[in-house]
Image (cartoon, helix red, strand yellow):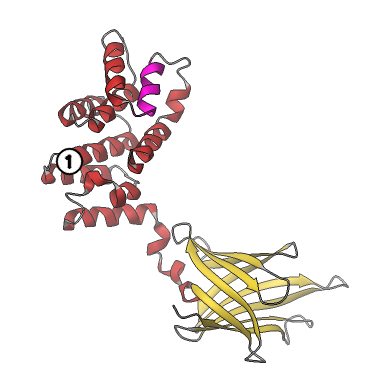
Amino acid sequence: MTHYKYLVLFLLFNSYFVMAQNIQPSPTRGADSLFFNMRYKEAISKYNAYLATASNPLNITYARLAFSNHFTGDYEEAIKYYNLILSKNPLPALKAQLYSRMAMTYAMKMNKEKALVYLDSANANGYLNAYEMEKFKDFDSIRNLPRFKDIYQSVSNRVYPCKTQPRARDFDFWIGTWEVYNNQYPNHRVGTSVVESVSGDCTILENWYAFNSPGDGKSQNWYNPTTGKWTQMWIGSGGGATQYNDGEYKDGAMRFKYTQTDAQGVVQPGNFVFENLGPDKVRQYQDISSDGGKTFNIMFDFIYIRKKS
């Protein structure tokens, strides 16, 4: 059984989770069990038997019946139940899901124009499932059409807002796999760093591996569109966490600020800087001030050299 069916079932169950909690015990439990076990023909029989006597069936029953018919290839029957639910004027989130499923069904029927019309309606109602647009075979017949690509871009922008926020891309120059050296002693290798864009490009994750010494760790780096600033949270293998704030990319460098307290309780300001020295080189250094910010002393100074494939 293909992977996409498992995901569809999960999404359908998730969409109706709150509603389903309120029907204990469910009169369609037997049919639902067959549905979730992908025994669709048997599920259809049980759902139809229930609907023949039910006075006020829930939309979830019709939706699962529609899906069951879709999975058995009875697209006309699936469309009948989609339209039935839509005639009850469901909320936009459910409309978006139903329109997307109708788009799938018409795409499977090779009615490309109708498939795109319904997909456009799904998008207009806040459709969020970019994954199924990328992966589900139901969209294969229209996936390469310009209109599909436009709708996909709109959905993707909604689902992954960080991808299109220009300032959220300021730190992308640090993404990559790097060999790291002490800038004061160029042949002194101090570690390896693998820096990834994760969480839908909303976080830059650093994976630091010290060379011949303790001190591995990770940092998460993210842009806050409300403040217009970056934050880094570092957690090392020695325990504890350090937060660097007010990150801003200007003059070719990402510049964070931080403070630490010395043994006498005096707060010391510092800077944490990543200089963009081109596509294959980054300088990272940290300094601290013991005189209230008048002068700064460098604590460490590293050069990142991008590893070649």
Quarter holding the C terminus is bottom left
Name of the residue lying farthest toward the right: 264
Number of on-image labels: 1
Q: Is residue 220 left or right of residue 148?
A: right
In depth, the one of 45 and 91 nearer the eye is 45
The reply to whether residue 9 is in sight is yes
Write down the quadrant of residue 269 in the picture.
Answer: bottom right
Q: Where in the figure is residue 33, as x and y percent of width and height?
A: 40, 22
Write down the quadrant of residue 47 in the picture.
Answer: top left
For the point 31% across and 12% down, which residue is it? 50
- Residue 304 higher or lower than 120, as above or below: below
Packing grade of label 1 (10 A; few <14, some 14-19, many >=20) is many
In depth, the one of 167 and 20 nearer the eye is 20
Write down the quadrant of residue 154 in the picture.
Answer: bottom left
Quarter holding the N terminus is top left
Q: Which residues are magenta?
A: 28-38
